[in-house]
Image (cartoon, rainbow, N blue to C red):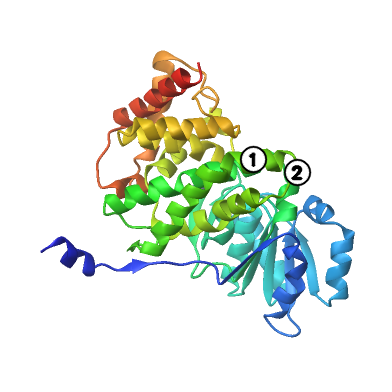
Amino acid sequence: MSRSDSESGRTTAIIMPMQYRQGPGVIRELPEAVARFGERAQALVVATSGGLERLGEPLLADWRAKGMRARFAEFGGECSEAEIGRLRTEAESCRASVIVGIGGGKLLDAAKSAAYRLELPVIIAPTIASSDAPCSALSVIYDEQGRVAKLETHPHNPDVVLVDTEVILQAPLRYLAAGMGDALATAPEALACLRGGGRTILGAYPTRLGTAAAELCGRILEADGVQAYADAGRGERTEAFERVVEANTLLSGIGFESGGLAAAHSLHDGLTELPECHHLLHGEKVGFCTAVQATLLGEPDETARFLTFCRQIGLPATLAEAGLRQTGAELRGKLLVAAERALAPEETIHQIGRTFTAAEIADAFEETDRIARRLFA
Ligand SMILES: [Zn+2]
């Protein structure tokens, strides 16, 4: 069978939010977004008390003036079965017709899961741009000890995503950088998945549009990432900042889900096995692991490029900065623990179409660290 014959027999797939709106002040559109689900639609709005405080009383008054019917539920802090069950009960008791999540990744994931289990639509309004969670049809569910218990896939992506860039600009800079770390992996992972003949988490092959979203995400970070980081640091909402928020949130979301994942996220999962790395945000680990993926694939120029980018936006760019200050056999032992986890059967590293050993992965971590220390000496 020729290459084109085998390709034409494959199923490709893409999924994405029904509606995505980004810009300064779009959070004010929430009443209209809720009303789309019925004239007398009742919303359960999940937020933290600090989050609502930051949005401010004038906004809440504006929502009330527009006639938005809402009950507010304070988020408990963890996306766990207990928390999802509690939100579900709250939604049932106020006869909610739509669930709204306003906040960060775990809160948004809990809102998505509660809505999915009640077969209700969900509106997502991220207050930080720290990962590609807002647009995805996935929730990461944790156990009561804070360990990842499972990934829940939903039958569809959020109905509406409202990304208010004024709100995101006010968040600590660390979150924007972490979002860029997560988004940095999107293009090289999608390309490694494509070249390796791998499948996406949808169980299908990548659509060209999924791959293109990932590549555009990478180009925006390269052109605008450092500028956006500096602009946000000065509190300026510039075009570069707007483009990077779209890259972190929408393009990375479509790119990872429908373009494919590869080694970087598996290496990240490996680092979650090490308590030394627990203080880091998801994207802070993924950025460094993007450089390790390039080393693993024999692309040292890419390794250097990714490490330089991480360094420029304050992300960990050496093992020590990622929390691993051990040396010699002690460090090697830690890296082998991470490597074993990265090679677990469910991990996306297998989509590359090559087999790796734990020793090769530990080598790649060490070699990336050497390249980094030479670069930044
Ligand atoms: Zn990620």
Front residue of 173 and 145? 173
Mark found first going from the N terminus, 1 or 2:
1
The location of residue 280, given as percent across then percent down, is: 59, 35
Can I make out residue 369 in this image?
yes
Q: Are marks 1 and 2 in contact (CB under 8 Å)?
A: no
Quadrant holding the N terminus: bottom left
The location of residue 261, given as percent across then percent down, is: 40, 50
Can I make out residue 270 in this image?
no
Report if the beta carbon of the residue with label 1 is closer than 8 angstroms to ligand 1.
no
Residue under the point 41% across and 14% down:
328
Residue under the point 25% across and 47% down:
353
Direction bottom: furthest residue: 39
Res. 229 mark: 1
Front residue of 283 and 82? 283
Find residue 210 and report its image quarter: bottom left
The crowd level at tag 2 (other Cα within 10 Å; few <14, some 14-19, many 20+) is some
Q: Residue under circle 2? A: 235
- Horizontal side of residue 274 vs 22, given as left or right: left
Q: Is residue 217 above or below residue 271?
A: below
Residue under the point 44% across and 38% down:
290
Element at badge 1? Answer: helix
Residue under the point 55% across and 58% down:
250
